[in-house]
Image (cartoon, helix red, strand yellow):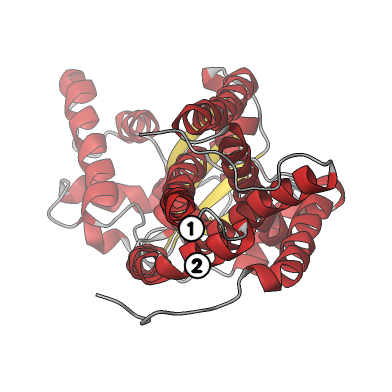
Amino acid sequence: MEFFHNPNIDFLGKKWYFLAFSLIFSVAGVYSMLFWHHIPYGVDFRGGTLVYVKFSHPPNDNALRAAMDRAGLHHAKIQRYDIPSNNEVLIDLDVQETSEQSLDKGKAQIINTLEKNVPPGKIDLNNAPVLTLKNYLMDKDPMHLGSDAEQKYKEQAQAIVNGRDKVHGGVLTSLEELKGVVDPTVLASLSDGFFLSDFGVRNVEIVGPQVGAQLRKQAILATAYSLAGMLIYLGFRFEWIYGIAAVVTVFHDTLITVGAFSLLDKDISLTVIAAILTLIGYSNNDTIVVFDRIRENIKLMRREKLSDIVNRSINQTLSRTILTAGLTFLTVLALYLFGGEVLRGFSLALVIGILIGTYSSIAIAAPILVAYQDWRVRKGKRPTAMPVRAR
């Protein structure tokens, strides 16, 4: 299948436009990383506490941020996750501790921040653990159990928590929702000591700063090793200038992708790093296809200028490039639009990377080969096309 029949586009003649485009986005990204948003590391890399909160109504993000600021949590990040109708948000706190107490600390901070108009002497049923419920029931003893109270009330407390979390998604809007779940006398006693807030803390996760630093180091090393491996492979497979051109191209793609995340202030998580490593392979594969055609055409067109050979090679592979990149782009775009918040960063990196990686194979990698050839000519070295090793 071909989109174009014998195209003859002068790509190298537009190299200065391509260079200007790359410079604008590269400089903007570097500026953002150095002076504006910096590199927006996710909790995986910088450490912190993640608190998952479910509301009984659609939450107001601005009101949540204002509440966080009033409570002194100025660096908290708030983002929606899952489907919007579930009314769930993820709050990223800058609490970098590794002890078990930090789990309770993060949860307590959110509960104290979001609770409003708390009745005196009452406990929030939507955020009460099993132990609190059990102790309350044992003290009240609504079922008049006497010596058998502890085990029975523990079962009743567990039934309340299961009904709240598993049946009603973590948030009760009325005590009537527990009818048939617990004993009627237990249900009647709950109104004396508990009230219902409009939210429930579903889960708390922590990543220690030392673990985050280690993951950050490993991510950087993984990217560096992949670039080095490509340089070595292409150096032996083609010529060293091909390897250098491919590595510069991939570095360009990575820089623009990370810069875009900084400009958009989107967290870079482990899944984003996985996407970037995927893009390194994808962009390199697309570049090799162009390089391979250049190498074949050099054998057939040895007397022509390298710039003409490169232009023709790009045009000959243009249909293949658009077909492959276009289908891949549509797939990752669907993943970005419909994949949900959990995959948002991963799919965004792929969307940006597919576009930039396809562009750079044409606009960055190929001109580097011609620029090298021109440099050789200026230095008085052999002006013919670079020699090609036999397969």
Using a 10 Å C-alpha cutoff, classify the residue at mark 1 as few (fewer than 14 neighbours), some (14 to 19) or many (20 or more): some
Most foreground residue, 127 or 26: 26
Q: Is residue 154 visible?
A: yes
Whether pointer 2 and pointer 1 mark residues with C-beta atoms closer than 8 Å, the reply is: yes
Residue 375 has which mark?
none
Quarter of the figure that contains the C terminus: top left
Q: Is residue 357 left or right of residue 24?
A: left
Residue type pointed to by label 2 = Arg
Q: Position of residue 225 (x, y in %)?
A: 54, 25
Label 2 vs 1, first from the N-terminus = 1
Residue at the spot 23% in from the left edge and 22% down from the top edge: 150
Q: Quadrant of residue 85?
A: bottom left
Q: Is residue 14 left or right of residue 234?
A: right
Residue 312 has which mark?
2
Residue type pointed to by label 1 = Met
Residue 301 has which mark?
1
Query: Is 387 placed above or below 80 here?
Result: above
Quarter of the figure that contains the N terminus: bottom left
Q: Position of residue 15 (x, y in %)?
A: 70, 67
- Residue pushed farthest right? 35
Q: Position of residue 122 (x, y in %)?
A: 50, 47
Most foreground residue, 329 or 94: 329
Q: Is residue 28 left or right of residue 169?
A: right
- Residue pushed farthest front? 303
